């Protein structure tokens, strides 16, 4: 009797265990199919998203091309789209088709963090253009450079009046390209070469440089520099300011002092607006001297003031050289300086006449060769 009861109890227990296993199996299968269906739905969405992304990418590539060509005159966006390029109508919101945009480039800092301060400037080591080019691989044809990691606040044309100074130019390029790149300047370098052996005219060549540089790019700042002057501190930032800027205020040949209060020679900078306000530079200063004083007079007579860096920052070294032939001191310069008020409206960028001979873009600079005429005959003194 006891054995019979024990057997029935075991039978009931086995049936209960089997029932529990069956229930467990059914629950597992339900959960499995539910998860499978969710995964299948996600996979389908993923495939659809990839297909839509490819279609959007294809459509985007067309739009990028056509946007690029809109810079041409009289171009309009719809005229460049074919029927197959039009986006099909969709019931989904437009936001579903938007493509993530790239992060805009930030403006360059007013004081770039990579400046090193006082520089050791020497002219004893041999210099070649090939060496300078190797040292500045990011400078593009024509001596152009734009900072890759930020948006420069100004577009600067650096203009150098030039004749027979190839030795000096190598050193100038060797030192200035790295300085300008550290300063995060968007710049181009223009060498304005006076052809022939007639009397040199520095200020007229600067007017030519202003005119020709604007044919090459939309510059809004112009730095006018002699080829034999090298800044000794890269905190002397080569861009334009609220007032016309005199950079070379402390040259070694003057004992690192400003020679006189109205001195504006060597290296200076004016915005396009400031340059036009003074009618550019005088064209009638043939030979050495006087034109920078005339420019200073033009600035003050037009209600502007000359700004300068601190004397510790505005230091320059000059490459020593003999006085150039056909650049003798102009004996008329003192009389001309006294008459700036009467001459500046009729003598300047508005009266500039020259003949452009050639424009050649080299890896480190743009060379512009011109003929600017001859000085008028001097009045006979009886």
Image (cartoon, helix red, strand yellow):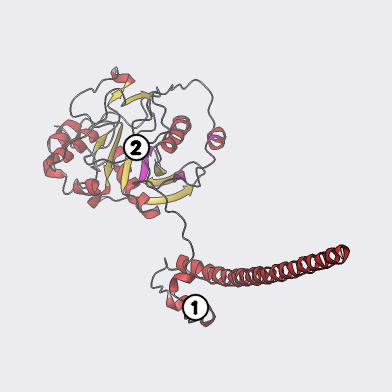
Which circle's residue, 1 or 2, is located before the other in the chain?
1
- List the residue tagged with mark 2: 238
Q: Quadrant of the C terminus?
A: top left
Q: Residue at x 39, y 51 (%)?
A: 356
Q: Position of residue 22 (x, y in %)?
A: 75, 70
Q: Say if 358 sits above or below 118 in the image.
A: below
Image side of residue 72 versus residue 376, left or right: right
Q: Quadrant of the N terminus?
A: bottom right
Res 261 quadrant in image: top left
149 in the magenta segment: yes
Q: How many discs mark residues in the rendered view?
A: 2
- List the residue tagged with mark 1: 87
Image side of residue 300 versus residue 190, left or right: left
Q: Residue at x 40, y 44 (%)?
A: 187
SS majority, magenta? loop
- For mark 1, does the 10 Å Cα neighbourhood hold few (<14), some (14 to 19), or many (20 or more) residues? few
122 in the magenta segment: no
Q: Secondary structure at mark 2?
A: loop
Viewer-side label of 1, 2? 1
Q: Does any portion of residue 194 appear in the rendered image?
A: no
- For mark 2, does the 10 Å Cα neighbourhood hold few (<14), some (14 to 19), or many (20 or more) residues? many
Pick the residue in front: 28 or 238.
Answer: 28
Q: Residue at x 40, y 34 (%)?
A: 113
Q: Position of residue 273 (x, y in %)?
A: 23, 49
Q: Does any portion of residue 329 appear in the rendered image?
A: yes
Q: Secondary structure at mark 1?
A: loop
Most distant residue in the top direction = 255
Pick the residue in front: 95 or 241.
Answer: 95
Most distant residue in the front direction = 1
Q: Say if 189 sits above or below 122 in the image.
A: below
Q: Which residues are magenta?
A: 135-164
Q: CA distance from mark 1 to mark 2?
A: 48 Å
């Amino acid at each position: 009797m006891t054995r019979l009861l024990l057997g029935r109890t075991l039978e009931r227990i086995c049936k209960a265990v089997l029932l529990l296993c069956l229930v467990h199996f059914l629950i597992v299968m339900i959960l499995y199919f539910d998860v499978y269906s969710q995964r299948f739905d996600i996979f389908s969405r993923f495939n659809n998203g990839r297909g839509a992304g490819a279609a959007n990418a294809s459509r985007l590539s067309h739009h990028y091309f056509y946007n690029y060509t809109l810079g041409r005159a009289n171009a309009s966006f719809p005229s460049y789209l074919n029927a197959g390029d039009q986006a099909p109508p969709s019931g989904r919101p437009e936001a579903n088709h938007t493509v993530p945009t790239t992060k805009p480039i930030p403006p360059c800092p007013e004081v770039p963090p990579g400046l090193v301060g006082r520089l050791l400037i020497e002219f004893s080591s041999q210099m070649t253009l090939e060496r300078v080019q190797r040292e500045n691989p990011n400078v593009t044809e024509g001596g152009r450079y734009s900072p890759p990691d930020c948006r420069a606040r100004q577009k600067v044309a650096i203009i150098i009046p030039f004749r027979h100074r190839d030795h000096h130019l190598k050193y100038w390029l060797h030192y200035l390209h790295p300085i300008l790149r550290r300063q995060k300047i968007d710049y181009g370098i223009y060498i304005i070469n006076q052809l022939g052996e007639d009397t040199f005219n520095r200020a007229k060549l600067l007017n030519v440089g202003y005119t020709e540089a604007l044919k090459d790019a939309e510059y809004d700042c112009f730095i006018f520099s002699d080829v034999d002057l090298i800044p000794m501190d890269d905190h002397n930032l080569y861009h334009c300011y609220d007032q016309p800027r005199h950079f070379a205020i402390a040259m070694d040949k003057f004992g690192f002092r400003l020679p006189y209060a109205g001195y504006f020679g060597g290296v200076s900078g004016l915005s396009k607006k400031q340059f036009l306000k003074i009618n550019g530079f005088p064209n009638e200063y043939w030979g050495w001297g006087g034109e920078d004083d005339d420019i200073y007079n033009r600035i003050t007579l037009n209600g502007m003031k000359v700004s300068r860096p601190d004397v510790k920052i505005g230091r320059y070294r000059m490459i020593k050289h003999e006085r150039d032939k056909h650049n003798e001191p102009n004996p008329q310069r003192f009389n001309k300086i006294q008459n700036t008020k009467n001459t500046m409206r009729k003598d300047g960028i508005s009266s500039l006449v020259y003949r452009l001979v050639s424009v050649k873009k080299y890896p480190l600079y743009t060379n512009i060769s011109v003929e600017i005429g001859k000085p008028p005959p001097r009045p006979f003194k009886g």
